[in-house]
Amino acid sequence: MRYRLLGPSGLRVSELCLGTMTFGTDWGWGADEDECRKIVGRFAEAGGNFIDTASNYTDGSSEEIVGRATSAERDRWVIATKYTLSLDRADPNAGGNHRKSLVRSLEQSLRRLQTDYVDVLWLHMRDPTTPVEEFMRALDDQVSLGKVLYVGISDSPAWVTARADAIAAVRGWSPVVAVQVPYSIASRDPERETLPMAAELGLTAAAWGVLGAGALTGRPAESLRWPGEPSERTRGIVAALTEVAASRGGTPAQVAIAWLLRRAAPPVVAIVGVRRLAQLEENLGALTLKLSEHEIGLLDEVSAPSLGFPRDFLESDDVRELIYGDTWSRLELASRPALRQA
């Protein structure tokens, strides 16, 4: 296991983050506590120190299991949780990004996690009824109180994160250090806006859905948690993953994770969610799988996303010629790799 700095902070997190939406059987398909403890123990043995949960995962059981599994060595763990989603469907203030929702959710999470602080608190999803200034000030207050150490934004438009971070910088509040997005070799939409923004601001991207809900494992569609026939594009990607895996003595899932970990602008932490210890063992195998430039090129080509405006427009040869004349290809961009795709 290697470690990455979380955005512009000095916090060291493992390159794999253990996702825990599968912790607890409340939703009918998760792991029981005994299996979860085995998963946490093996993850720690492999050098993992980053765990991600949320206030609503398995109706609170996830946080409770994480709390019991990490309490003996709390300080070695980087524990992240989230607030925003409603805690009471009948209460209009039980969800959202506003201060009352944040305080209520965080206090509940701290009790469940058996801790007096969380290392990272994610805003789970954008709530357009709450001003950015309100939630950033509310998050900063929790940092000042010592109940939260770092702030992240999940599943929100790029402009929300950029504006939030700019407001924090101007007002001296705790900055955003990371974004969390659904990102995989089969789902590269964040490359349109969110990842270039994160690279420009020096943020880390925590990727969830890295195996496409199991579609990238190569398993039959009917065996997946949410069965459904994959698209022609996804089938082509799985075929390429399978080809590379066969030449490497690995599995398609390992290749998909290894591809993700090679992304550098911004740096990516892969959130792996598993229900069985054997699945974690397979995912850990991605850490020793080194892809060649040829293999990365093959995978990039088969999974190339349609980025749309403004990316496709600004990165076209014609527009670059208008801006840079004949000099674009001669610019040295090694120190700013994000500019290669911006």
Image (tube, rainbow, N blue to C red):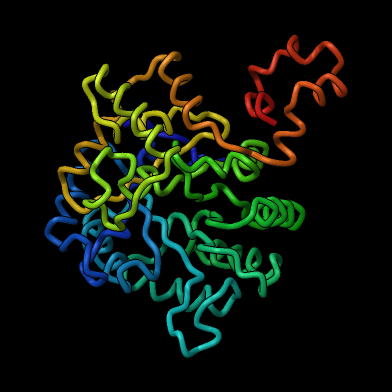
Location of residue 90 in the rendering, given as x and y in whole percent from the top left corner: 47, 90
In the image, residue 110 sits, relative to residue 317, either above or below, namely below
Location of residue 44 in the rendering, given as x and y in whole percent from the top left corner: 24, 43
In the image, residue 132 sits, relative to residue 42, either above or below, namely below
Location of residue 107 in the rendering, given as x and y in whole percent from the top left corner: 43, 75
Q: Which residue lies furthest to the left in this view?
A: 34
Location of residue 268 in the rendering, given as x and y in whole percent from the top left corner: 48, 37
In the image, residue 322 sits, relative to residue 294, either above or below, namely below
Give the left or right position of residue 148, taking residue 331 as reference: left
User: Where the N terminus falls, by quadrant?
Assistant: top left
Which residue sits at x=41%, y=39%?
234
In the image, residue 273 sits, relative to residue 250, either above or below, namely below
Which residue sits at x=21%, y=58%?
69
Give the left or right position of residue 117, taking residue 35 as reference: right
Q: Nearer the viewer, residue 175 or 335?
A: 335
Q: Which of 163 and 167 is in front in this view?
A: 163
Q: Nearer the viewer, residue 37 or 96?
A: 96
Give the left or right position of residue 304, taking residue 207 as reference: right
Which residue sits at x=81%, y=22%?
318
* Residue 114 appearing in the image: no
